[in-house]
Image (cartoon, helix red, strand yellow):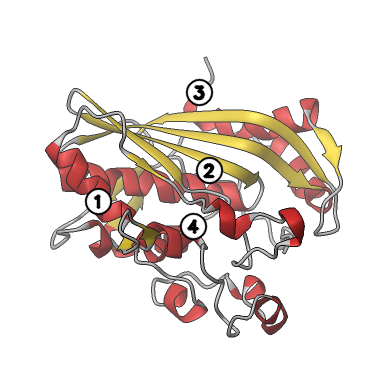
Amino acid sequence: MTLPEMQYHELLRTIVNSGQWQETRQGPRTRVALGLTMRFDLQREFPMITDRDISGFWRGAIGELCAMINGARTLEQFEAFGCTWWGPWATEKKCAKRGLEPGDIGPASYGDVFANYPGPDGAPFHQWLAIVDQIKREPALKTHVITNWLAGHLTRAYGHQPTPTIAPCHGHVQITVLGDRLNLEMFQRSGDVPVGVPSNMVQYAAITHALAYLTGYTPGTFVHHIGNAHFYEDQTEAVETILARKPRPLPKLVTNFEGVDVITDVRPTHFAIEDYNPHERILSIPVAV
């Protein structure tokens, strides 16, 4: 049985040992492994990797998801939540190609789908607000599901141009209440394991704590599924550095949700980390845009 702190490490090793190289639209090839999963008991650990120091941006990762839950789709909206890395996906060139103003990642992007999903009457439907209400009313349901995918906006079939500047990579969520524990599974269609996945681990584990608080349950298990788990060829040196290190025990999460009444109230400041002892940072891991 793999120790919690080893799961991210072993996920990367699986890609190295069992993956296949694939050409990409971004330029550098990716090495891809399919259908990988990590599982964390949030009563015992918080999945903030120790293979490299991410203390400089973990709150920004939580802020990113909080912004998305609040419907963010512009750089200004993301930055208001402490997330400052969306610039490369909101350039004048990328936006103009889709008829958008610079700084706008577009309709059918993460926040737009989370907060403005088309309802049965055509009116915008806020999935996260609704899921909290549904859990409170009927916790045993198997339909506590949030999706981030509007296929008609994202296909390239028949020469269509996707409406957002990037297709959502993460955010298909299923929540299951078992006993007094609220458990969350997140399916990620595409995971850049050296760069993006550590942020995704942190943000969805954190939001599980917030959902449990708002619905009156104890945080349970966070399960992170990745459909296409990969690293880019120009990230190989960073991957080798990570795999040469021995993971350390995971830290603990401390929360204070005083004043949080709805999921859209959650902010990065409601979370703190204790006993984080990572290896040193790895600077300038390339990011594909």
Labelled pair 3, 2 in contact (Cβ < 8 Å)? no
Q: Earlier in the sequence, mark 4 or mark 1?
A: 4
Q: Earlier in the sequence, mark 3 or mark 1?
A: 3
Q: Earlier in the sequence, mark 4 or mark 3?
A: 3
Labelled pair 4, 3 in contact (Cβ < 8 Å)? no
Where residue 166 sits: x, y (%)?
A: 63, 62
C-alpha span from label 4 to label 3? 22 Å
Q: Amino acid at mark 2?
A: Ile
The numbered mark at residue 49 is 2
Where residue 66 sits: x, y (%)?
A: 37, 61
| Disc 1 target residue | 130
Q: Quadrant of residue 94?
A: bottom right
C-alpha span from label 2 to label 4? 10 Å
x 39%, y 71%: residue: 81
x 53%, y 48%: residue: 170
Q: Amino acid at mark 3?
A: Leu
C-alpha span from label 3 to label 1? 35 Å
**Mark 4 element type:** loop
Q: Is residue 226 above or below residue 179?
A: below
Q: Quadrant of residue 159?
A: bottom right
- Name the mark nearer the viewer: 4 or 1: 1
